[in-house]
Image (spheres, grey):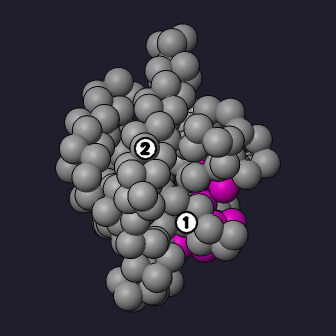
Amino acid sequence: MIPSVTAAHSLLSAAERAAIAEIEATTSILQLVTRLTGMRFAGIAKFTDLEWVVCAAHDPLHMGIHVDDVLDLETTLCSEFCINPQALFIPKVSQNGRFATRPVVKQYAIESYAGAPIFLPDGRLFGALCALDSQSMLFDDPNLPETLSLFARLIGCIFFANLTAADQ
């Protein structure tokens, strides 16, 4: 269930919302992620202790995941980064017993997933950069994990710089 937009706004500070809005590169990065992965959705999500909050989305597939949507963190595939902070690629979610039963998989008809954790330069886990599709993907580029992780690092650095500037 998705809480109201007002609830999402309370999970993101004014500085965080402003930083996301100021990052002109976000849309370009998300478009690049869809091109590199071959997937048709890419997004940036913030983690709270219990929630997964969409900060930015590129959704030509119209999966129905929108900015300010909030999901229970434990129901998402991205929650894996709280346990293992390494890039994660799942070419056929439906054939992966560990992930196929998560509610978000059925809710959005997710068949493939690629993601990387977003860390702020001070080491805090901010959230995730993820790509999704309703079709299975091969992920045959051996550089893809490192490339996705570099994009996540770039997002974390830009976001942190904007947050730091907003706090001053």
Residue in the picture at 73% in, 52% down: 82
Residue in the picture at 31% in, 63% down: 18
The answer to if 77 sits in the magenta stretch is yes
Q: Is residue 25 above or below residue 100?
A: above
Q: Do we see residue 31 in this rendering? A: no
- Find disc 1 in the rendering and name its residue: 52
The answer to if 33 sits in the magenta stretch is no
Judged left or right of residue 81, residue 140 is left
Q: Is residue 44 above or below residue 65?
A: above
In the rendered image, residue 105, in percent from the top left (x then y), is placed at 54, 59
Check disc 2: other Cα within 10 Å, few if <14, some if 14-19, many if 20+: some
Tell me which segment is drawn in magenta. Answer: 71-79
Which kind of residue does numbered mark 2 sit on?
A: Ala
Q: Is residue 126 above or below residue 101?
A: above
Disc number lying in front (2 or 1): 2
Mark 1 element type: strand
Mark 2 element type: helix
Which kind of residue does numbered mark 1 sit on?
A: Trp
- Which mark identifies residue 104? none
Foreground residue among 124 and 44: 124
Residue in the picture at 29% in, 30% down: 32
Q: Earlier in the sequence, mark 2 or mark 1?
A: 1
Check disc 1: other Cα within 10 Å, few if <14, some if 14-19, many if 20+: many
Judged left or right of residue 47, residue 65 is left
Q: Is residue 138 above or below residue 89?
A: above
Q: Residue furthest front?
A: 168
In the rendered image, residue 73, in percent from the top left (x then y), is placed at 63, 66
In the rendered image, residue 136, in percent from the top left (x then y), is placed at 45, 37
Residue in the picture at 67% in, 73% down: 50
- Which mark identifies residue 161? 2
